[in-house]
Each structure stands twice: as structure tokens, then as C-alpha cells.
Image (cartoon, rainbow, N blue to C red):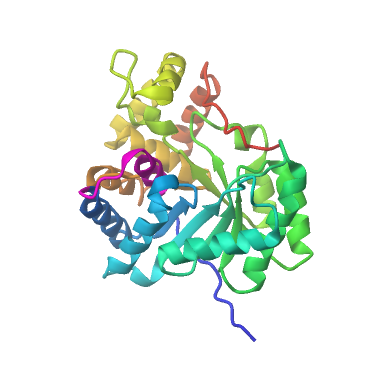
Amino acid sequence: MQTRQELFLPQMGCGTWAWGNQLLWGYKESMDDQLQAVFNLCVSNGVTLFDTGDSYGTGRLQGRSELLLGKFSRTYQGVNQDHICIATKLAAYPWRWTRQSMIQACNASARRLGRNVDLVQMHWSTANYAPWQEEGLLDGLADLYEQGLVKGVGLSNYGTKRLQRVHQKFAARGVPIKTLQVQYSLLSTYPVTELGLKEVCDELGIQLIAYSPLALGILTGKYSENSSYPQGIRGLLFRQLLPGARSLLACLRAVAESRNKTMSQVAINWCICKGTIPIPGAKSVTQAQDNIGALGWQLDAGEITELDQVAARADKKMVQNIFQTK
């Protein structure tokens, strides 16, 4: 009989999803050492949850994000080494629709990582466009847990109704859902304020993970209406959002200055105070140090209420993920 080691989740993770997106557009060998240094710094400071996906760095890069994360994990020697938790998300590609396809996908991720996946997650629900596809994928996700190939299973971009349905399906097999990952920040409160996901997750014993807690960088204070914007779609989004986020950014800046913290640290700490695990991306040691500075302290109730109220009045909100279900 196989003995199962249960999944342990730290208070904050460092999301490698940002690395994956970057690597997808142009990987450079010279970045290996820099990213290894980021990984080492995070783990040595107690940030031990690393989230990626099998669709990050695909195509000609052949799952580069998972390959790099596996390399960094094997290379690291030091404190918290035994607490490193690797989470990956399996994409609901059109050619994946059987339970066996999910098992094969997870095994492929494990080969790239050079170790078993700790937390395997469904990257998105197909309920919005191909609900028939999802049943087999969910069965495969549960199979991975039952077969002891992973320590825990989770979901991503699921809304309240869909989450409750999947929870019921998995509970019938004795498979707990450990996590739910959604886009959540001061500019994207929709999953909690409108879908009520935090209350449902608390009721079902599911940990809510907040991806994009810095709203793609808008909440860092690095960008303004008078500064240069990132290129491409991200720049277009910034042009739409920044004018309506003036009050929120001003409030965030004021709180940060009063706390002698950065705006990023306040925005991440707000997510922590809301009972979520934020997974900000980090591509440099400087960014990682800034993220780590969000730990070890807490905003007070008055500051949280002030940020909540200003966020609620923001003219523009982050565009929700097209795969987010209700």
C-alpha cells in the first residue's frame, strides 16, 4: 500500500509563470545564472512555492520553464531545500480530452522537472466553450492523486459554481482540492467581491492563490500616464487602465510611504491579508528582494479598508481571464 505525503503550502509563493512568459518570447543562455540567483534568494528567505505551467515556454523552447525550474531546484543547496514545493498547471489543449492524456501530460512535466510534481493544477476550465472535454481531464487529475503521482491537485480560473461542482465530483472519490488559482489584486477583486470565491474556498478547505497580484506591473508604481509603456498588448492595456487607477495608485503610494515600504510590497501584503497566497513573478534579484519585503508584517485594518474602498471606486478594472468561469 502506497504511503502518501500530503502537500504543504507556504504563506507566499514566487510565481515562475512570469519567467515562463518571458522565456516564451526569447530565451537567452546568459539569464540562467540570474534566474538561479532569484530562485536561491527566494528559497533561502522561506519562499518555497514555485508555480509554473506546461504551456510556458512551449513550441521550439520545449517546456523551457519547467526545465529551468527543475534545474534550479536540483542545483540549490541550502536552508529550506526540503520544503521546495513545485506546482505546475496542465493546459486543456484541444487534443487532451481523456483521463490518460492528463496522466501523460503530468508525467511529461515530471520528466522536464526531473522530479515528481507536488501540486498539479487544471490550467483552465473548458466549460465556457467545450464542457464535454472537461470530464475526462478532471478524471485524469483525480487519477494522478489516487495513484500517488502528486501530493495534491488544484484548479485555476474556476468560478464558484464550477468549483462546487468539481469539488462534489472529487469528494465522491475522496480526492481533496488543495488550491484554486485566480487573477486577484487591488485591480482585480472580481473573483472575491463578485464571485464570492474566498468564502466558498474557506468553506471547502481550499487555499486561494492570487496570480498577477501586481496587475502586470501597474501596482508597482513604475508606470504612469506620462511614462513610456511596455510594448504590445500590455502597453495598450496600460493606456486603458492607468487613467482610471490614479486614485488607487495615489492611495497605494501614500500607504507605502507611511510604512516605509514599496508600492509592490503593500499590494502583495494586501493579498496576504485577504487570506490568499500571492505568486508575484521575479526575473531579477532586485524584483525578488522587493517581493520578499512583503513578508513579516501586516497592513492594519484601517489601511486595508482604505485600499478596499479606493479599489472599489476605480474607473477601470483588470480584464478578466477569458477562461474564468462563474
For the point 68% across and 38% down, the residue is: 325
Left/right of residue 159 with respect to residue 257 in the rendered view: right
What predominant SS class does the magenta segment belong to? helix
Q: Is residue 321 above or below residue 98?
A: above
Quadrant hosting residue 220: top left
Query: How many numbered marks, from 0 up?
Result: 0
**Residue 275 on the magenta segment:** no
The quadrant in which the C terminus is found is top right
Q: Judge whether residue 227 can be spotted in this image.
A: yes
Q: Residue furthest bottom?
A: 1
For the point 49% across and 28% down, the residue is: 187
**Residue 23 on the magenta segment:** yes
Q: Residue furthest front?
A: 60
**Over which residues does the magenta segment extend?**
15-30
Q: Judge whether residue 57 can be spotted in this image.
A: no
- Give 228 or 218, whichever is nearer the viewer: 228
For the point 46% across and 38% down, the residue is: 212
Left/right of residue 258 with respect to residue 142 in the rendered view: left
The quadrant in which the N terminus is found is bottom right
Quadrant hosting residue 37: bottom left
Q: Is residue 312 above or below residue 74?
A: above
Q: Point out residue 142 in the picture as x, y percentages from the top left corner.
A: 68, 63
For the point 39% across and 60% down, the residue is: 48
- Give 253 or 114, whichever is nearer the viewer: 114
Q: Point out residue 167 in the picture as x, y percentages from the top left corner.
A: 73, 55
Q: Point out residue 182 in the picture as x, y percentages from the top left corner.
A: 56, 42
Q: Is residue 82 above or below residue 198?
A: below
